[in-house]
Amino acid sequence: MVANKGTLPSLLRTASAPKLPPLPKLRVRRPEATNANPCIAMMSSVLGCWASQGYTTQGCAALEQSLRVCMDARVRCPDYDVLEKVEL
């Protein structure tokens, strides 16, 4: 005889856990090349500066300004333009 096979707690555990149906295999049909954001390295530098300076703007002003310039000059992704045209 197997221990704890017919006990009430073991029966409740198996009864309360619903079984999920199997999911179909997911595939990526056409993987799109992602555009690397040129401002990620600059943002990482700003966050690192803030962490080392105690979140003060005095020592990180030059990095913050260069991040602003990078974000303003960056070419927009076409997906963002499509999202802006959709009215909610």
Image (tube, rainbow, N blue to C red):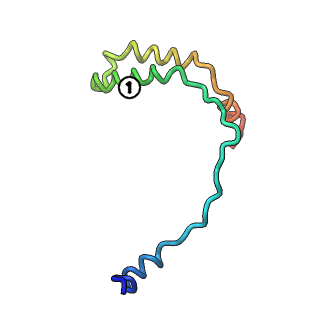
Counting from the top left corner in percent of width and height, residue 42 is at: 45, 19
The quadrant of the image that shows the N terminus is bottom left
The quadrant of the image that shows the C terminus is top right
Which residue lies under the disc numbered 1? 47
**Residue at the image position 52 percent from the left and 16 percent from the top:** 70
**Residue at the image position 42 percent from the left and 24 percent from the top:** 44
Quadrant housing residue 19: bottom right
- Taking the image as shown, residue 49 lies to the left or right of residue 79, namely left
Closer-to-camera residue (59/13): 13
Q: Amino acid at mark 1?
A: Leu
Counting from the top left corner in percent of width and height, residue 14 is at: 45, 77
Counting from the top left corner in percent of width and height, residue 65 is at: 44, 14
Closer-to-camera residue (9/50): 9
Q: Please say if 71 is above or below 17.
A: above
Q: Please say if 30 is above or below 13.
A: above
* Tag 1 secondary structure: helix
Closer-to-camera residue (66/11): 11
- Taking the image as shown, residue 50 lies to the left or right of residue 38, namely left
**Residue at the image position 62 percent from the left and 20 percent from the top:** 75
Quadrant housing residue 86: top right
Quadrant housing residue 46: top left
Q: Please say if 44 is above or below 25.
A: above
Closer-to-camera residue (4/51): 4
Q: Please say if 32 is above or below 53.
A: below
Q: Which residue, as the protein is rendered here, is positioned at the far front?
A: 1
Classed neighbour count for the residue bearing mark 1: other residues with Cα under 10 Å, few (<14), some (14–19), many (≥20):
some
Counting from the top left corner in percent of width and height, residue 29 is at: 70, 42
**Residue at the image position 64 percent from the left and 29 percent from the top:** 33
